[in-house]
Image: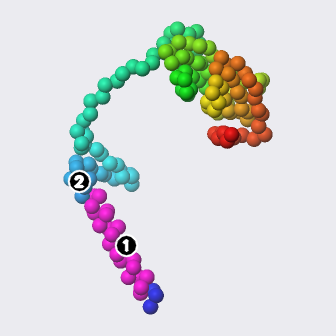
Amino acid sequence: MSDRGMHMRRIPVLFCLALIFCFLTMSCKKQGITTEVIDGVNHIHNPAEPLKGTIDLEVEETLRIDPAQFEVEDFVVFDNFWKDPVGNVYLMIWKSRNVFQFSSQGDYLGSFIRIGQGPGEFPQYSSLFLDFIREGEIWATGGRKIARFDMGRNLLGEIKLDNWYSPVKYVD
C-alpha cells in the first residue's frame, strides 16, 4: 500500500517539472532565443537586439592615474587595487609586490611593500590583501604574516603566522 502511495505522489511532481520545462522552452522560442546542441553541449544564442531595449550609458571620469609619470616597470599592468575610507587608491603589481598609494585626486604619495622575508616584506608567490581596519592604518595580509602600516606607509609592526590563512577575517 505504501509503494502505491509513493508512486501516486511522484506523478504530480513529474507533471510539474515537465510543465516548467515546456514553459521555459516556449518562452525561449517566443523571445527569439534559440538553442542548439553541438557535440553534446547545449548552446544558447541570444537575439541581436536586447529583449527589453537598449540603454545608453555615459561614462564619467572620476580619477586618472597616468603611468607615464612613474619610472616603474610594468606599472600599466597592475593586479589589484583598493580604496581606503578617506579615498586614497592603492595599486599593486603582483610580480614585484609593490603597492603604490595615490591620493583621491590622483597624486602619487609613495610606494611600500616589496618582495622578501624581512619586516614589511612579503613573498612573491603568496596572496596579498590590504584592509583598513583601524583609522589611519593599512593592514597587509599574506605570506603567513600580517603587517600594519600607517598612512605614510611606515611599518608599525607585524605578526608572523604558523599556517597559511587566506583570506583573513579580523575580529576585534
The residue lying at 68 percent from left, 33 percent from top is 142
Q: Which numbered mark, 1 or 2, is in the foreground of this view?
A: 1
> How many other residues sit within 10 Å of disc 1, few (<14), some (14-19) or many (≥20)?
few
- In the rendered view, does 150 fall on the left or right side of 87? right
The residue tagged 1 is 13
Magenta residues (range): 4-25
Q: Quadrant of residue 3?
A: bottom left
* Residue ID for mark 2: 29
Residue 73's spot in the image, x, y percent?
58, 14
Disc 1 is placed on an element classified as helix
Point 36% across, 21% down: residue:
60
Identify the residue at image location x=72%, y=21%: 155
What kind of residue is marked 2?
Lys
Whether the magenta-drawn stretch holds residue 93 is answered as no
Crowdedness of circle 2 by 10 Å Cα count: few (<14), some, many (20+)?
Answer: few
Under mark 1, the amino acid is Val
Percent across and percent down for residue 63 are 45, 18
Side (left or right) of 106 relative to 157: left
Distance from Cα at disc 1 to Cα at disc 2: 25 Å
